[in-house]
Image (cartoon, grey):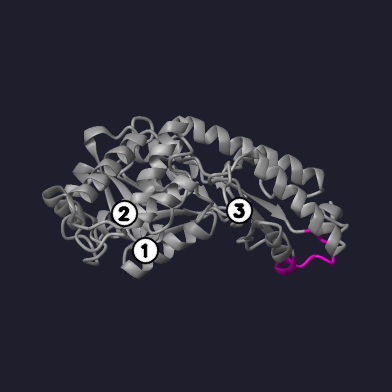
Amino acid sequence: MIVGNDPVLLTPGPLTTSLATKQAMLRDWGSWDAAFNQVTASLRRDLVAIVGGGDEYACVPLQGSGTFSVEAAIGTVVLRTGKVLVPNNGAYCARIVKICKYLGRAVVDLPVPEDRPASAKIVEAALAADPAITHVAQVHCETGAGLLNDLAGIAQVCARMGRGLIVDAMSSFAALPIDVRTVPFDALVAASGKCLEGVPGMGFVLLRKSVLEASAGNAHSLAMDLHDQYVYMEKTTQWRYTPPTHVVAALRAAVDQYLAEGGQPARLARYRTNTETLVAGMQALGFRAYLAPEVQAPIIVTFHAPADPAYDFKTFYTKVRDRGYILYPGKLTTAETFRVGCIGAIDANEMRNVVAAVAEVMREMGIRQVSPALARAA
């Protein structure tokens, strides 16, 4: 699937994009031009349709990285007197806790082991213990490890107990199934440079209109006020401030390809095949995945680093990159690891190629003891 000589990005975003997506950025757009506004409007409709939102939900795009939109969602949706529960089993959950503290929103940091999913049971217990909690902020796929949390179960608990749900679906939207009819939420955050296979630079939030319309005055920031952005877009069809025009155009091309591929089921099938091919190949070399298969999301896989003293991640990374593949460092606190992404405009052939590249680098570095020290001790 790859065209050109650029390294393949085996990361959870930015990621490798198709030639058609790259070519969409070769045109300049006027930010107030009717043609560009139509592109924005069509994207807003299509992104809501991916979760079956219908007329009850609206898409509000925002300039910047996905974290900008996570902060905007919390700041817009949660009252300043509100309280947010964050089941925390990784770096991106911890970032939400930090955002809440910056915004002056009361937050309950609920610790969950890095290799265990957040469950409906623990969320229900936390909500029952603290009636002051108004919202749950749940990361769907915690890419610090590649862990898949129980979003569907947690959504049902929130609905039953009358608490709002804000979903960080940054690394899962458009690949893993999310339908508002079975996974009700107040707000869901994602971004252009993830499983839609666009380029980075634009986040977006899918919001229940009734929640959005009731949020006037909540926001801590003019630039990140999703209610103000929504009202302005509905009135004028334009962005309030200069939009990332080339990013929007690339995302339109990427979403067109997504729909042509077969939408979410087809994208999940390709990513799942990528993941299975990668894991099988790395296991044949002696590597061990950090997560159990039943909680592994088909987005990014964390592998234990080799215990061999010849292993050094920076050298390993550079040599694999020289062969055309960019890996990702580990982001865990309890084990030395590295990560390999399975998303982007890539297929199983690229997974086989990166395994071959890793095998060459191991021979070159003299790495013989691949399994981690803890596995040897066990």
Q: Position of residue 234 (x, y in %)?
A: 15, 48
Q: Is residue 191 visible?
A: no
> Can you tell which mark lies on residue 228?
none
Amino acid carrying mark 2 in the image = Ala
User: Is residue 52 on the magenta stretch?
Assistant: no
Residue located 70% across and 69% down the image: 314
Name the element at disc 1: helix
Q: Position of residue 46 (x, y in %)?
A: 31, 38
Magenta-colored span: 306-315
Q: Position of residue 232 (x, y in %)?
A: 15, 54
Q: Position of residue 346 (x, y in %)?
A: 58, 43
Amino acid carrying mark 1 in the image = Cys
Inter-mark Cα distance, 3 to 1:
35 Å
Which marked residue is nearer to the observer: mark 1 or mark 2?
A: 1
Inter-mark Cα distance, 2 to 3:
47 Å
Which residue in the protein does label 2 denote?
Answer: 132
